[in-house]
Image: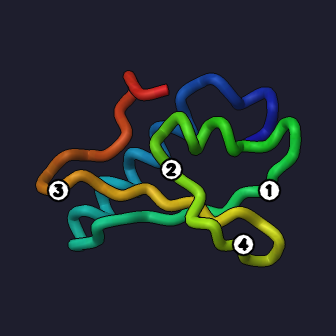
Amino acid sequence: MAADGQGLGVGRFAVQAVSEEARRRGNDRITVLWERHPHGPEGFYLRLGFRPTGEELFGEVVGELVLPPGNSPGPSAADG
């Protein structure tokens, strides 16, 4: 997300929507990749509950969010 679009809740909304759809399709986790650098998205993903898996792909961190069971939508606006 471009710097001028950060902090508006768009990224959180996108993660929540993807989480809901993944759960609806029967998935129990979602994964993302991020670069580690001072102004990167790592803090954002960690606040939403993603955790590094210990793997790297294309030189980027692989992060995983385990989705709660049932119809719970994943990260909420109150998270992070």
As drawn, the residue found furthest toward the bottom would be: 58
**Which residue, given by chain and number where applicable, does mark 1 sit on?**
35
**What kind of residue is marked 4?**
Glu
Q: CA distance from mark 2 to mark 4?
A: 15 Å
Is disc 2 in contact with disc 4, using a CB cutoff of under 8 Å?
no
Quarter of the rendering containing residue 59? bottom right
**Which residue, given by chain and number where applicable, does mark 2 sit on?**
50
Could you tell which of marks 4 and 1 lies nearer the N-terminus? 1
Q: CA distance from mark 3 to mark 1?
A: 29 Å
Element type at mark 4: strand
As drawn, the residue found furthest toward the right would be: 38
Q: How many marks?
A: 4
Label 1 neighbour load within 10 Å: few <14, some 14-19, many 20+: some
Is disc 2 in contact with disc 1, using a CB cutoff of under 8 Å?
no
Q: Residue at x 35, y 33 (%)?
A: 76
3 or 4: mark nearer the eye: 4
The image position of residue 24, as x and y in percent, is 21, 64
**Which residue, given by chain and number where applicable, does mark 4 sit on?**
56
